[in-house]
Amino acid sequence: MAPRRGNMVTVLSIDGGGVRGIIPGTILAYLESKLQELDGPNTRIADYFDIIAGASTGGLVSTMLATPNKDNRPLYAARDINNFYLKQSPSIFPQNA
């Protein structure tokens, strides 16, 4: 279970940068794996942050981390980000644009 923070608000800001969303994806997957070692396999990044936001591709990553499933838990794990980018980047970031 995520620690209680009293009146503190925790913010995760994810940088933009097009297909370089793989970089924060890698870092967030590592962070989430370490949090899962502490709090169990269902732990997600969203359990630790009150606000998750980003610009451009960071907004896409933040949406993946914060979108709820039918049980009001995060729909995606951080480990899903890089696979998404590798598969979808040609259609999201076309070379002829």
Image (cartoon, grey):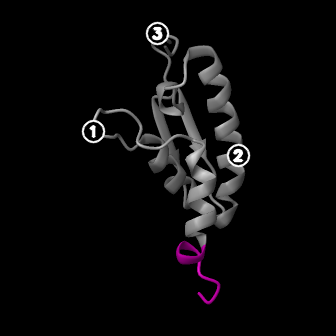
The range drawn in magenta is: 90-97
Q: Residue sitting at 71 percent across and 41 percent down? A: 27
Residue pointed to by mark 2: 26
Q: Does the residue at mark 1 contact the one at mark 2 (Cβ under 8 Å)?
A: no
Q: Residue sitting at 58 percent across and 66 percent down? A: 87
Image quadrant in which the C terminus is located: bottom right
Give the residue furthest to the front.
41
Residue pointed to by mark 1: 70
Q: Amino acid at mark 1?
A: Lys
In the structure shown, which secondary structural element does the residue marked by tag 2 occupy?
helix
Mark 2 is surrounded, within 10 Å at the Cα level, by few (under 14), some (14 to 19) or many (20 or more) other residues, namely some
Q: Amino acid at mark 2?
A: Thr
- Residue 15's spot in the image, x, y percent? 64, 52
Q: Amino acid at mark 3?
A: Gly
Magenta: predominant secondary structure element? loop
- Residue 11's spot in the image, x, y percent? 54, 33
Of the two numbered discs 3 and 1 on the same chain, state the one appearing first in sequence: 3
Q: Quadrant of residue 31?
A: top right
Q: Residue sitting at 55 percent across and 18 percent down? A: 40
